[in-house]
Amino acid sequence: MEETLSEQPQEDPVERRFGSNQVGVKQFNERLILDIIRQSGPMSKADISRITKLSAQTVTVIVNRLITDGFLLKNQSVKGRIGQPSTPISLDPDGAVSIGIKLGRRSLDAVTMSFTNQIIGKRSLFYEYPDCDRVFSWIRENTRSLIADLTPRQSERLAGVGVATPYMLEGWEGVVGAPKGAMAKWKGVDIGQRIESDLSMPVHILNDASAACLAEMSIGDTSKATSFLYFYIGTFVGGGIVTNGKLFTGLTGNAAALGSIPLHMITETGRVPPPQLIEAASIHRLEAMAEAAGLDRQTFYSDKPVTEAAMNIFRVWAIDASSSLAFAIIAGQSFLDTGLVIIDGNLSRDLLDILIDDIRAQMQRYDQQGIEAPQIKAGHLGNDARAKGGAILPLHANFAPDNNVLLKIR
């Protein structure tokens, strides 16, 4: 069931949604209550009634049913306040379990995730490039292994599979260093259909950067922000757009294809930068620079301190990356006026912070007259953002009170 909400002034997303005591909306009200508890944490039935504007009797009936059905838990009563002790109601972590798959150009991740968005189990595979047959075989075997590791109750409550993957996976074959023709098998492959056939579960697919953005807006530290522009610095740079509390994915599902932003500028040294953001700010370029210097391309992902040689390479890469990202942020702000930009990626936290500081400095070199400079923050989900975003998709499909993802699911 999908519900569409009309645009409203930006306010607390919990407070602005209201239920109805009318017959025929039972499913919506159940989802509404689950979503409110998900966002705000354990709360009493009285608080749920206050926020939803549902009658106390209606809330009691729905909450009791959700407890019986295994989606909610009744916690220990809280005493010491004026009036009767209140009993907080929380989500049952095992109330539903989802599977998230991140299918990328350099790696695969598969996770099982609880109803409270905690990773239960994880499997990872790294490769030079994604071989089609190997990828589907790995997903089938490792997802089944993750399911086998679940408790009997968890496995009975599987909600489905969400896949976060770049569109046109066969593209940029030479850039990722794949042999000529090695990725041609991906052309025309229905990824969702293949995985659904292998696992016999419903599958939802979303662009990998948009999925990372979905995870940020749902469970990140900025989950209360109703509008922001999102950048994910991965093998290829990508992004997402959140507006009025909804993830916007566009006509074809490829909104915020930030890597395709053209760059028309010359640096102070007179060098002509790469023609698109994808070539200036993607990690594959940093990896290539590291390998050319005899370093492991995984150097920049670990949270261990990098060597002086690695830092020098990172600094050179960051010249074009930060300047290009600053340009993209200002361009995006002129269209969206969100006031907030979130940047995440699979760089180590220290290097991501350095890159963000460089971006802030580079933004001062651009004429920003006529726009309000946005606040720039680091995301906090890192490498897990895309897999978690995938895992959120089936939970949204089964439990969200409205479709807060304006998405074209393939």
Image: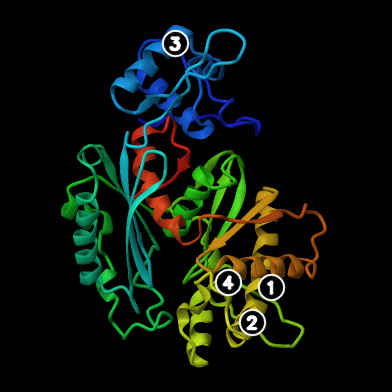
Q: CA distance from mark 3 to mark 4?
A: 50 Å
Instruction: Please state which amino acid type lies under the numbered disc 3.
Output: Asn
Which mark is in front, 3 or 4? 3
The quarter of the displayed image where residue 132 is located: bottom left
Residue topped by disc 4: 277
Chain-order first, disc 4 or disc 1: 4
Residue depicted at x 48% and y 78%:
284
Instruction: Please state which amino acid type lies under the numbered disc 1.
Output: Ser
Q: Are marks 1 and 3 in contact (CB under 8 Å)?
A: no
Residue topped by disc 2: 273
Is residue 280 visible in the rendered structure shown here? yes
Residue depicted at x 31% and y 41%:
97
Q: Are marks 3 and 4 in contact (CB under 8 Å)?
A: no
Is residue 25 visible in the rendered structure shown here? no
Q: Are marks 1 and 2 in contact (CB under 8 Å)?
A: yes
Residue topped by disc 1: 323
Chain-order first, disc 2 or disc 3: 3
Percent coordinates x, y for residue 117 in the rendering: 42, 44
Left or right relative to 17: residue 203: left
Which mark is in front, 1 or 2? 1
Q: Which mark is residue 31?
A: none
Q: Nearer the viewer, residue 183 or 142?
A: 142
Q: Are marks 4 and 2 in contact (CB under 8 Å)?
A: no
Instruction: Indicate the quadrant containing the N terminus: top left, top right, bottom left or bottom right.
Output: top left
Chain-order first, disc 1 or disc 2: 2
Instruction: Please state which amino acid type lies under the numbered disc 2.
Output: Pro
Above or below for 237 versus 293:
above
Chain-order first, disc 1 or disc 3: 3
> How busy is the neighbourhood of tag 2: few (under 14 within 10 Å), some, or many (20 plus)?
some
Residue topped by disc 3: 21
Q: CA distance from mark 1 to mark 2?
A: 10 Å
Q: Nearer the viewer, residue 254 or 344?
A: 344
